[in-house]
């Protein structure tokens, strides 16, 4: 009985210490929003100094993602019994979610070794993903499918803009999103636009669709213990909304307010039709896309918008002309690199 009470007290103490340290870690940014929060986080998390990729792989395979001698491919769910001495030298190996070929500027060794965006994967799937950007594959029926007889399936194929992309399994979409948002925040000069695909709108959807779980929170602590910085979007998912918009601040994501933004939607919730009022600085081709909360494209329309306010109507029908089911949808408007996103409720 005494031993059990001691264990309980120890767990309570460790949990209290964890909460205290976590609060201290974000004290300088906790009340910030927008750009102030983004750059405050960059300053806060830019203290990792590890440059040894080999050491990072040892941590990854031997402790961080090793459970009873087993590791798991993040894209397929396939398990491998690797023991405790494996270093990722063959199969499985290490995935850089922010592909190495995307690296710009300095700190290449740090970027390559940063555990926040390193994950274990089947070597064949890793090679197939290559450096393709992450996005929704428009047609899973014609895509390359990667699975190992588990519920987890990933895809490589063309997105709605007919560009080759890689779509991770639903069970890992949020993890990928937060890893890339971390990398974009941490390393100045890196971009989320790769191969003419702007990943940010999809990452924001995936972040909401697949929020952090206990395993991701525990992993974040493990990375912190090794390289002394944390992924803030795992500890504080609301930071994503405070920077890019969303539930924590509003339902709008303003990426370039002077050029393009959603001025209003009405009615919201809607039953049969919704009007989206868009403000643009100049006449421009504009693409309006509607996604469900799984990130799947339901509707797409491109037209020339005049400067000032313009109105677009969506009648709730998908690309096949079928009525979409009731639920939450993401409306994305895009002109070049300028985008805005709005969350709406269809009744």
Image (cartoon, grey):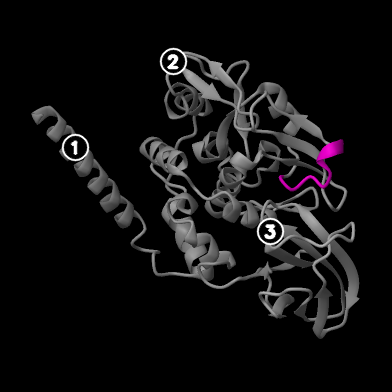
Is the N terminus in the top left, top right, bottom left or bottom right quadrant? top left
What element does badge 1 sit on? helix
Q: Is residue 333 above or below residue 132?
A: below
Q: Earlier in the sequence, mark 3 or mark 2?
A: 2
Separation (CA) of disc 2 from disc 1: 29 Å
Magenta span covers which residues?
134-142
Badge 2: residue crowd in 10 Å (few <14, some 14–19, many ≥20): some
Give x and y (percent) for residue 301.
87, 66
Residue drawn at x 66%, y 38% as measured from the top left = 169
Q: Position of residue 232 (x, y in %)?
A: 46, 53
Our reading of the magenta stretch's main secondary structure is loop
Instruction: Say whether marks 3 and 2 touch (CB < 8 Å).
Output: no
**Callout 1 crowding tier (Cα within 10 Å): few <14, some 14–19, many ≥20:** few
Q: Which one is nearer the viewer's eye here, 207 or 344? A: 344
Label 3 sits on residue: 201
Point out the frontmost of discs 3 and 1.
Answer: 1
Q: How far apart are the two marked residues, 3 and 1, measured between alpha carbons?
A: 44 Å
**In the rendered view, would you say 89 is above or below 311?**
above
Apparent side of residue 137 relative to residue 347 in the rendered image (left or right): right
Instruction: For mark 2, give the secondary structure.
Output: loop
Q: Please tell me which residue lies in front, 252 or 192.
A: 252
Residue 8's label in the rendered image is 1
Secondary structure under tag 3 reads helix
Estimate the x, y position of residue 236 in percent, counting from the top left: 44, 56
Instruction: Tell me whether the residue at label 2 lies in contact with that at label 1, contact meaning CB atoms closer than 8 angstroms.
Output: no
From the viewer's perspective, tell me whether residue 260 is left or right of residue 71.
right
> Residue 149 occupies which quadrant of the picture?
top right
In the foreground, 106 or 57: 57
Tag 2 residue:
84
């Amino acid at each position: 009985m005494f031993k059990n009470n001691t264990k309980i007290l120890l767990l309570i103490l460790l949990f209290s210490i964890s909460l205290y340290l976590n609060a201290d870690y974000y004290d300088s940014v906790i009340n910030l929003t927008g750009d102030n929060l983004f750059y405050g986080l960059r300053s806060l998390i830019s203290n990792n100094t590890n440059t040894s990729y080999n050491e990072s792989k040892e941590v990854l395979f031997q402790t961080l993602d090793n459970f009873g001698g087993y590791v798991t491919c993040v894209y397929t769910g396939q398990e491998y019994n690797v023991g405790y001495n494996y270093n990722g030298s063959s199969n499985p190996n290490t995935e850089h979610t922010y592909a190495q070929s995307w690296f710009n500027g300095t700190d290449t060794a740090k970027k390559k070794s940063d555990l926040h965006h390193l994950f274990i994967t089947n070597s064949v799937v890793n090679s197939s993903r290559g450096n393709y950007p992450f996005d929704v594959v428009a047609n899973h029926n014609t895509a390359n499918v990667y699975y190992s007889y588990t519920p987890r399936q990933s895809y490589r194929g063309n997105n709605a803009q007919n560009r080759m992309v890689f779509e991770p399994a639903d069970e890992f979409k949020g993890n990928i999103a937060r890893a890339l948002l971390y990398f974009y925040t941490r390393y100045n000069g890196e971009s989320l636009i790769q191969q003419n695909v702007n990943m940010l709108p999809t990452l924001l959807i995936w972040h909401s669709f697949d929020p952090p779980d206990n395993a991701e929170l525990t992993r974040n602590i493990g990375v912190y213990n090794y390289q002394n910085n944390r992924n803030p979007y795992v500890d504080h998912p609301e930071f994503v909304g405070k920077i890019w918009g969303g539930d924590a601040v509003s339902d709008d994501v303003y990426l370039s307010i002077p050029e393009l933004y959603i001025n209003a939607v009405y009615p919201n919730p809607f039953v049969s039709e919704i009007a989206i009022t868009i403000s643009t600085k100049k006449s421009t081709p504009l693409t309006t896309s509607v996604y469900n909360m799984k990130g799947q494209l339901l509707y797409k329309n491109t037209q020339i918008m005049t400067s000032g306010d313009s109105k677009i109507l969506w009648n709730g029908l998908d690309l096949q002309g079928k009525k979409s089911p009731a639920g939450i949808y993401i409306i994305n408007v895009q002109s070049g690199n300028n985008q805005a996103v709005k969350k709406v409720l269809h009744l």
